[in-house]
Image: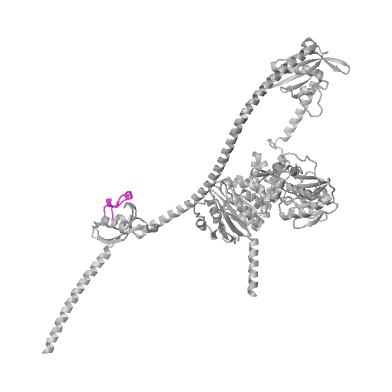
Amino acid sequence: MDNLFHNMVIKDITKNIEENLTIVGIGASAGGLDAITEFFDNTPADTNLAYVIIQHLSPDHKSLMKELLSRHTKMNVTVAENEMRVIPNNIYLIPPAKSMIIKNNKLYLSERVTTAGTSLPINTFFTSLAEDKKEKAIGVILSGSGYDGSGGIKVIKSNGGLVLVQDEKTAQFISMPNAALATGCVDHVLSPSKMPSKILEVLKGVIEEDFISNTLINNEEVFNKILSYIKEYTHTDFFHYKKGTVLRRIEKRMSLYGIESLEEYLKYININVDEIKSLYKEFFIGVTHFFRDKEAFEIIEKEIVPSLFEKKNPGATIRVWVAGCSTGEEAYSMAILLKEYMNRVDKDYNIKIFASDIDDAALAKASNGLYDSNIEEHVSCERLKNFFIKKEDKYQINKSIRDMVIFAKHNLINDPPFSKVDLVTCRNLLIYLQPETQQNILGFFHFALNENGYLFLGSSESIGNMGKHFIPYNNKWKIFKYGGIGKLNRINSFSISNIGGYVSERNSSFLNYGSSKASNYIEKSVDKIIKQLQEEYVPKGVIIDENYELVHVFGDVNRYIKIPSNKLSLNLLKMIRPDLSIAVSTSVHTVINEGKELRYKNIRIKDPDGYLEICLTVKPYVDEATSKRYVILLFEEEGIDNCLDEGEDFQVHAKVYQRISDLENELKHSNEHVQAIIEELESSNEELQSTNEELLSSNEELQSTNEELQSVNEELYTLNSEYQFKINELTEAHDDINNLLNITNVSTIFLDRNLCIRRFTSCVKKEINIIDSDIGRPISHISMNLKYENIIDDIHSVVSNLIPKNKIVPGFSNDWYQVCIYPYLASESRIKGIVINIENMTAVVTRDNQIKKLSEEKEKMEAKYLEEIRSLKNQLAEIGSD
């Protein structure tokens, strides 16, 4: 029983550790080895985090990452195995030629699959990490080429995780970091050495309030100026956003340029106006995907959607407002749910989904409805088949769903809300706004909803003190029901502005506003004077271009031209009154072709009081600056003297025939020209079609080859980095051995298989006349200070028999040496040369000679004593016999 209880406790503790374990995924490619080692040089061994490194490794070479990285950390470094459990304070490495995912804190390996020569192991792991660990996932992108990892960090960010990217200054290859930055999902841009401390600070939550308060205490005025500039240039007010959120975005832009203070950044945006637009885009965190939070959308599908329809008759309108729609995935998700319901009940309703945002780029993508193939992870195969069209490697929402959604630019803070809405969704937008602004917007939502309407917020958002106005329907997924018509406390009301406007682009600075205003007043006054003079002295007339399009009007010409009904056109020939059309068309055609002034008089037009005779003057004009041609037409009544004296009498019949002839010639030339163009186009089209097919084929091959080369280059670079570490290590070992040999006074010569000198120690120069330039020479060419005549024969003997030889030989200076000849054996007992070791044995030989001499003297003394003993024994024997 005790064992059972103990096992249960251990199991609960293990489960708790795994659920709370934060895992740091590190993606790197070319140039990433240095960044990884720098990262772990600054990472404590007791962070209680787990680290998983995903590198682009060559499948054809053994990776040295484990042994290299082990020198830079005290944590255990392990090459991942299938179903290996991840535990804190450990580092896991992806094996070569493998893809890896994590699920329930276990690593799962599979063979790496490449598409068109490209594999994206970082994206694969980051996606699984985000789905498994949610907000406890941290993604780090280090040096590398390509774009691997940029898709994965989007998923990490959308699940509430943290994303860090190596800054451009310290990255050897910037493609991967830049691709990650382009997603807009990066929290911090830092050098690898600063990343570990930043991760720990964020996890401990110690930087938020301190950073905000310290920054604003000293820079409140500068901060407000930056926001004022953004508002002036983009018409978007960020004063209502949480200051911490805005400051982090500003800090991120500052880090990109190495700017350390808000004052310096303010000066920078004064000089570089485009930076204001870049900062403006930085504030939009467009993290979304189809059916985000699957469980929440199941509730919407099964409970909320049916309730929207139950009190509506077929043909009635269902109105949905998706506020902060970003790139449209959530709006289309709602449209699909509503469409599916109508298909199930087999009834038609008028669906209007208003999807609004203030980000023009996001709205443009949403309106197009074209998405990457990674939506397959969130959209079922059945829905992909029913509501999407496959276009190469992308999916586009079909027309029936797109027609249900209306995308509009709309600022929740300032613009009026939509009205009579059945469902409002605003997910993960309010968390970026200040509390009072949140309450204002919730008030707008209350105003927008019908009595039976619903409000759908993000899982991290709440309704604050609006509990009387919204009734909780599902607390976990923040779904609320309209709760009555109580009086709402609003901080301020909305202003009526143009919904759907665009961000204005201005190249002027904020200075000289007063002077430019005064200048506008003067220009307006001059325009009024000129207009009055035209009315009094200039004849009534029009200016047209060479395409007969109306450019300008002098005076009241309503008697001569008439605005056409139905479709508006500025073509003069469609606006001129019928009884003037022959004169105008003939004269304009002549003036354009011949380039000279023409005047017709006695042109009769019908007037309410009878007939009126006018004079038509047509003048050419060429703009020297642009070389563009214009025609001026002036209409003067015959009562004016200068009109009567000059000009040609207008003969209607003659001009009609002339105009018909001109038109026939023009038509003939036009037909001939069009026919020639058609033939040329047909020929060119065939050639272009053929060329296009060849180019497409070549482009696909080049793209595939380029991606393969890119992948190989990354792997080779990584391998080269590992080898460089190994070479440095071998160099150090070589230096260590040389120093050791010099300290021990070992005299050794290394010969190759051809008995040529390969290496020698400095001490051997005493016994053999050898210098550094002798390396590569045969040993037989070198003279020795030894009396060892048959040394070459003995060397050959060792090479042949692999049996070492030892000999003690004299030198030329009464010294003695022991010469040891050994075979130099490599792996598998292959002989690679000879090692000759020479040791000075003079002291040993001298000692041996002394010992030998003493032994001889001892033997002589012993013989002498024995002889004396025998003599004494003989004498004693003689005495005894007597």
What is the chief secondary structure element of the magenta stretch? loop
User: Range of the magenta residues?
Assistant: 767-783
Q: Is residue 652 visible?
A: yes
Residue 171 image point, x, y percent: 56, 47
* Residue 509, quarter of the rendered image: top right
Q: Is residue 187 visible?
A: no
Relative to the observer, which residue lies in front, 611 or 846? 611
The residue at the far top in this view is: 645
Residue 373 image point, x, y percent: 65, 47
The residue at the far right in this view is: 609
Residue 774 is a magenta residue: yes
Residue 639 vertical placement versus 819 (above, below): above
Residue 771 vertical placement versus 46 (above, below): above
Relative to the observer, which residue lies in front, 469 or 56? 56
Quadrant of the rendering where the N terminus is positioned: bottom right
Residue 680 vertical placement versus 106 (above, below): above
Relative to the observer, which residue lies in front, 244 or 768? 768
The residue at the far left in this view is: 882
Residue at the location (74% across, 19% down)?
A: 632
Side of 756 relative to 676 (left or right): left
Residue 779 image point, x, y percent: 29, 52
Side of 589 relative to 419 (left or right): left
Residue 230 is a magenta residue: no
Residue at the location (62% across, 46% down)?
A: 181
